Amino acid sequence: MKEKILNNIAKNGKLSTEDLAAMLSASQEEIEEVIREMEKEGVICGYPTLINWDKTDCERVTALIEIKVVPERGRGFDKVAERIYQFEEVESLYLMSGGFDLTVIIDGKSMKEVAWFVATKLAPMESIQSTATHFVLKKYKEHGISFVKKDNNDERQLILP
């Protein structure tokens, strides 16, 4: 039951418990209890709204920052990550495998603002060896939701063999 609820609200956080109950052949009270339990356990951590900022007048830029780190003895990457994710500018932070250790995702008002964050807050941290900043130029899909409307008017000519 939990997995079915999570799969449904992951795509649409606005689903009511009444709708979920009907979809999953359960009572509304049962759905509400399971959701309360998952919120209490920290399985459900929040209900953010996915916004396509390109459709607004708000100037925003998203950056992915690769970080190479010297892990702290006895604490690994956790202590460094804890210091980084406490910055209000940090949208997401992931421990990675491969050529770098951490990925930080920042949403800022401008490239200059992101660069200032990296230069004054992130790069000077003692355990950080290097950073590489990549700016998102266009978002096509995020959290499983497409930002691009499909154009069904394909004007290419069909060529038959």
Image (cartoon, grey):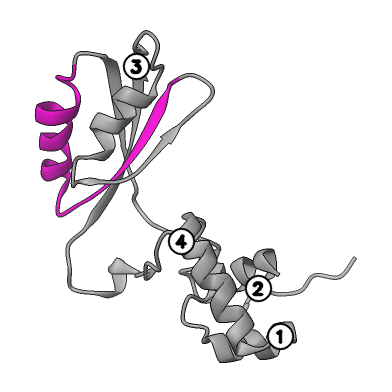
User: Mark 1: which secondary structure?
Assistant: loop
Residue type at tag 4: Lys
Q: Looking at the picture, how far across and down is residue 45, in whole percent?
A: 42, 59
Residue at (46%, 55%) from the top-left corner? Answer: 42
* 30, 96: nearer the viewer: 30
Residue 154 can be seen, yes or no = yes
Determine whether the residue tagged by mark 3 lies in a helix, strand or loop: strand
- Height in image: 76 above or below 118? above
> Could you say which disc has been placed on residue 100 in the image?
none
Quarter of image, res 139? bottom left
Q: Earlier in the sequence, mark 2 or mark 1?
A: 1
Label 2 packing within 10 angstroms: few (<14), some (14-19), many (20+): few
**Residue beneath label 4, please?**
40
From the viewer's perspective, is 86 left or right of 78? Answer: left
In the rendered structure, which segment of residues is drawn in magenta? 100-125
Give the residue pinned by disc 1. Answer: 26
- Which residue is identified by label 3? 69
Quarter of the image with the C terminus in it: bottom right
Marks 2 & 1, CB-CB < 8 Å contact:
no
Residue type pointed to by label 1:
Ala
Give the number of the mark in front: 2 or 3.
Answer: 3
The residue under the point 55% across, 85% down is: 17
Q: Give the Cα distance between marks 1 and 3.
A: 48 Å
- Residue 48 percent location from the top left of the image: 37, 67
The amino acid on which the numbered mark 3 sits, given as a three-letter code, is Val
Which residue position is annotated with label 2?
156
User: Can you tell which quarter of the image residue 49 is in?
Assistant: bottom left
Inter-mark Cα distance, 2 to 3: 50 Å
Type of amino acid under label 2: Arg
State the quadrant of the N terminus.
Answer: bottom right
